[in-house]
Amino acid sequence: MRLKDRIALVTGGGSGIGRAIALRFASEGAYVVVNDVKLDTAKKTVGELDGGRGRAIAADVSDSAQVRAMFAEVERELGGRLDILVNNAGIAVSGGDRERLRERAEARIAETFAGEITTHWDVTMNMSDETWHRMIGVHLNGTFFCTREALKLMSRVNRGVIINMSSVAALSGLDTVPHYSAAKGGILSLTRALAREVGSRGIRVNAICPGYIETPMTAGISPMMQKVLLSRTPLGRWGQPEEIAATALFLASDDSAFYTGQWLSPNGGLVIGG
Ligand code: NAP
């Protein structure tokens, strides 16, 4: 039991990677607060936790008032203790944009084989303020809002672990999602700065930069794009949420006691060397 009696909060725990992390942490003895923007998905994950050791709290992490209310509930109900925070909640491109990108991606793949690219991504020049702000709001602001509240609890005992979900998009940039890449890059830089800021309090801050993982977020990637991505991945397959949960468990446990300000990238070899 590597997390026996620790209290963890996992944002976006109702689906995909967050759900897998919540389940793994509970199986290692943690009590898990599962956050999600929808209460029913958070509750569903709690229902699957080993021994039912957890509670569900709905909050939109991009809204600082909702985040403050969530942490007030943690403080009230759990004696003001928080050992582990996983900033995992996230969004990808929305429906209409996804369709447009899919069409362009398929055109570009065909053109690449034909030897002449005439289809351009043109994502940034057409992006609305709203789309940009929403992406930064959920990922980067959400990570900041939750971290700010968690540090208030962790600083009381000068102990704690924060794990931020970044992405390979932060390491190499993704042409189709500049806003997502910027948000994930911001999260990585925040991780490094925080590690320096709060290390003297015994609080460790690290990031995970997953490659392509099979979750509802990536379910919309077209079969042709999937083949292209697989061809660039030495291990020749996508990752599973449980493989990211294993990395999160390492970073949450005392096995990583000398790690802070670092990133680990389970990515099948898609990005090597960062
Ligand atoms: P997912 O299956 O879509 O899970 C994300 C969860 O976060 C969903 O339950 C989602 O709720 C929730 N969420 C969205 N906005 C929220 C908000 N404002 N407040 C609270 N919860 C919110 O996606 P995933 O693939 O597991 O992704 C988890 C994290 O890993 C994300 O940060 C993602 O960027 C990162 N990541 C994923 C991959 C990948 O290949 N899958 C690769 C690298 C990094 P709704 O479903 O209702 O929106």
Image (cartoon, rainbow, N blue to C red):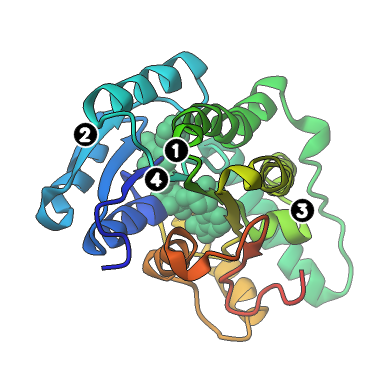
Residue at x 36% of width, y 57% of height: 21
Where disc 4 sits, the SS reads loop
Q: Nearer the viewer, residue 117 or 153?
A: 153
The amino acid pointed to by label 4 is: Asp
Q: In the rendered view of the protein, which quadrant contains the C terminus?
A: bottom right
The amino acid pointed to by label 2 is: Asp
Q: Residue furthest top?
A: 65
Q: Which mark is residue 83?
A: 4
Q: Is mark 3 within 8 Å of ligand 1?
A: no
Q: Which mark is residue 40?
A: 2
Kindly report the distance in space between the C-alpha atoms of the residues bearing marks 2 and 3: 34 Å
Where disc 2 sits, the SS reads helix
Q: In the rendered view of the protein, which quadrant contains the N terminus?
A: bottom left
Q: Which mark is residue 157?
A: 1
Kindly report the distance in space between the C-alpha atoms of the residues bearing marks 2 and 4: 25 Å
Identify the residue position indicated by label 3 in the image. Answer: 175
